[in-house]
Image (cartoon, grey):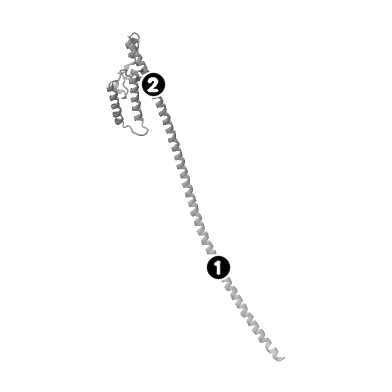
């Protein structure tokens, strides 16, 4: 497997990876180079400061891959646009909402445009770099705010769920108490009706007994009166 095959694909155009030892030798050779090579090396240094080289290890050797200093053509810009559209489809980037895949691809596309501009004019490249960094800071701030709002919403939802559970438990407890009280009320009503019924029966018996006693006494009184009249009647005739 080749060294470049192990690298992740990127929209940024890179040179062929080179061994770190070869890079050091190349830097030493550039010290005595011509003005044209010095200018190219200066451009490469600016690109490296804006878009740092990729470093990796392969089969025990350390490799470095720098951003390409080859000027971009109109065809390169069109190819970049096509590559971006194709990568968005292949990696199934979402069109709306937060999508890390789409964010990464647009970052790579912006970096490649910065590379194009930097090779033509270093000052414009640094200006675009500043714009890129400010945009990333703004996106990071929005992402932090979004995560905070999501966490806040989850906490509120959890609190509401806990509160709803407590309310449901309280309602269930009150309903059970109501049911128990209704049951106790039914028992007390039945007991009251039983007591009232027994009291009415006792009162009826007492009233009947009292009426019988009154009737007996009245009848006995009548008998005594009759006996008294009968006993006193002959005495009046003798006089």
Cβ atoms under marks 2 and 1 closer than 8 Å = no
Query: Measured along the vertical axis of the image, is residue 168 above or below residue 224?
Result: above
Mark 1 surroundings: few (<14), some (14-19) or many (≥20) residues within 10 A: few
Check the image and name the residue furthest to the bottom. Answer: 238
- Work out which quarter of the rendered image holds the N terminus and state it: top left
Check the image and name the residue furthest to the top. Answer: 32
Element carrying mark 1: helix
Query: Measured along the vertical axis of the image, is residue 235 above or below residue 110?
Result: below
Query: Measured along the vertical axis of the image, is residue 15 above or below residue 31?
Result: below
Q: Looking at the rendered structure, which numbered label has been put on residue 127?
A: 2
User: Toward which corner of the image does residue 109 lie, by quadrant?
Assistant: top left
Q: Is residue 65 visible?
A: no
Give the percent coordinates (x, y) of residue 25.
33, 11
Give the percent coordinates (x, y) of residue 24.
35, 13
Q: Which residue is mark 1?
A: 200
Distance of label 2 from label 1 (alpha carbons): 107 Å
């Amino acid at each position: 497997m080749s060294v470049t095959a192990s690298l992740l694909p990127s929209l940024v155009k890179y040179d062929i990876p080179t061994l770190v030892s070869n890079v050091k030798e190349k830097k030493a050779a550039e010290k005595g180079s011509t003005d044209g090579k010095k200018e190219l090396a200066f451009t490469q240094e600016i690109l490296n400061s804006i878009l740092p080289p990729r470093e990796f290890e392969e089969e025990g050797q350390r490799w470095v891959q720098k951003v390409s200093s080859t000027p971009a053509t109109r065809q390169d810009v069109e190819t970049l646009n096509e590559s971006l559209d194709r990568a968005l489809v292949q990696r199934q980037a979402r069109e709306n909402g937060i999508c890390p895949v789409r964010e990464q691809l647009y970052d790579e596309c912006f970096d490649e445009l910065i590379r194009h501009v930097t090779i033509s004019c270093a000052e414009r490249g640094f200006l675009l770099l500043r714009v890129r960094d400010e945009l990333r800071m703004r996106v990071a701030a929005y992402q932090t705010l979004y995560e905070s709002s999501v966490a806040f919403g989850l906490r509120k939802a959890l609190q509401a769920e806990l509160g709803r559970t407590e309310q449901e438990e309280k309602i269930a407890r009150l309903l059970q108490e109501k049911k128990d009280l209704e049951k106790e009320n039914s028992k007390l009503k039945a007991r009251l009706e039983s007591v009232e019924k027994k009291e009415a029966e006792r009162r009826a018996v007492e009233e009947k007994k009292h009426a019988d006693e009154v009737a007996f006494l009245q009848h006995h009184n009548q008998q005594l009166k009759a006996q008294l009249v009968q006993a006193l009647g002959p005495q009046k005739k003798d006089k």
